[in-house]
């Protein structure tokens, strides 16, 4: 009887070892399978993200003016930006096309004001915003060999504001502007009066036109969307010297547009900002891309 008991005990131990080994193998197989599925999902997401961002960049930037004009036709007020949303696979894309020349150009502001005045101007542009960005100026030397009407000391928002989430820079809704909706580092410095907000015109025309004169320009843009610049300025009772200076800071079109892309996946989000500036007699053509 004793040998049988020893044999039974050995078989039990062996069975337990086999079960433990099988459990370990199954657990490792499950982990490998899970990692493979996760890697496959991430690869699919990266492919959709890369393809989607490249596609919307080509489509939206080339059609920026058409998008903005279509947005104007749906709104009584001038609109310097238009937002749309779309889905690609498991990703949601929020696209915002903007007229960069409907914003106050920070490099032009820097040319006309000292650093303290520039900082005050950036704060003034955010005065009515729920989430104002803290101003932290970090100018850099202008790029060598680039033809520009004035020195480009600021070429990104990182040089203007304290580091923040990109969601705080750009607003999707027309009634909720953010700092990036009123301030630009790009373009030739002239402001498209047909699309600019009052705060942008006020900052750009500081010292040249008073509040009632700026109000007259805003009314012209609303009442007659196709109004030419000379037509908007003609009724103003302004000294010729100031009128000439104001004329040099305004225009009734745009040669610089941007596209902000926000993509949302299963567990995180991505942001891109693409800027395209067409050249003119005083400025080189430029393209920029920023990623968060």
Image (cartoon, grey):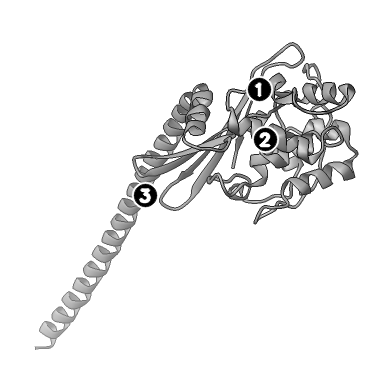
Label 1 sits on residue: 252
Which mark lies nearer to you, 3 or 1? Answer: 1
Instruction: Identify the residue shown where x is 22% and y is 67%.
Output: 18
Residue depicted at x 83% and y 21%: 244
Tell me the element at label 3: helix
Q: Position of residue 72 (x, y in %)?
A: 52, 32
Q: Quadrant of residue 210 in the image?
A: top right
Are discs 3 and 2 less than 8 Å apart at CB? Answer: no
Residue that badge 2 annotates: 218
Decide which of 146, 17 is in the foreground and name it: 146
Identified at 72% across, 38% down, the residue is 215
Q: Is residue 142 left or right of residue 292?
A: right
- Residue 140 is situated, as x and y percent measured from the top left of the image, at 82, 34
The circle on residue 38 is: 3
**Between 261 and 29, the one nearer to me in the picture:** 261
**Distance CA(mark 3)–CA(mark 2):** 54 Å
Quadrant of the image containing the C terminus: top right
Compared to residue 3, the image places residue 68 above or below, namely: above
Q: Residue furthest left?
A: 1
Q: Mark 3 against mark 2, which lies toward the viewer?
A: 2
Quarter of the figure that contains the N terminus: bottom left
Name the residue rendered at 62%, 23% in the picture: 227
Q: Secondary structure at mark 1?
A: loop
Instruction: For label 2, count other residues whose C-alpha is less than 10 Å away and answer few (under 14), some (14-19) or many (20+).
Output: many
Give the mark nearer the N terminus: 3 vs 2: 3
């Amino acid at each position: 009887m004793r040998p049988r008991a020893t044999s039974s005990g050995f078989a039990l131990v062996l069975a337990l070892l086999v079960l433990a080994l099988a459990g370990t193998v199954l657990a490792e197989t499950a982990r490998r399978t899970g990692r493979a599925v996760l890697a496959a999902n991430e690869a699919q997401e990266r492919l959709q993200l890369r393809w989607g961002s490249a596609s919307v960049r080509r489509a939206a930037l080339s059609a920026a003016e058409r998008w903005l004009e279509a947005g104007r036709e749906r709104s009584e007020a001038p609109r310097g930006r238009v937002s749309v949303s779309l889905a690609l696979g498991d990703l949601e894309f929020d696209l915002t096309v903007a007229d960069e020349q409907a914003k106050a150009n920070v490099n032009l502001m820097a040319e006309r004001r000292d650093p303290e005045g520039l900082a005050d101007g950036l704060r003034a542009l955010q005065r009515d915003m729920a989430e104002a960005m803290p101003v932290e100026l970090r100018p850099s030397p202008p790029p060598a060999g680039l033809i520009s009407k004035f020195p480009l000391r600021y070429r990104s928002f990182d040089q203007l504001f304290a580091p923040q989430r990109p969601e705080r820079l750009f607003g999707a809704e027309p009634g909720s502007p953010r700092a990036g909706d009123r301030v630009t580092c790009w373009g030739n410095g002239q402001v498209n009066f047909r699309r600019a907000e009052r705060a942008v015109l006020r900052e750009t025309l500081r010292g040249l036109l008073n509040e009632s004169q700026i109000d007259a320009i805003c009314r012209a843009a609303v009442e007659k969307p196709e109004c030419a610049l000379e037509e908007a300025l003609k009724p103003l009772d302004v000294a010729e010297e100031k009128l000439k200076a104001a004329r040099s800071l305004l225009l009734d079109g745009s040669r610089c547009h941007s596209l902000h892309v926000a993509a949302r996946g299963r567990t995180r989000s991505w942001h891109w900002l693409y800027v395209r500036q067409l050249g003119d007699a005083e400025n080189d053509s430029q393209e920029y891309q920023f990623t968060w």
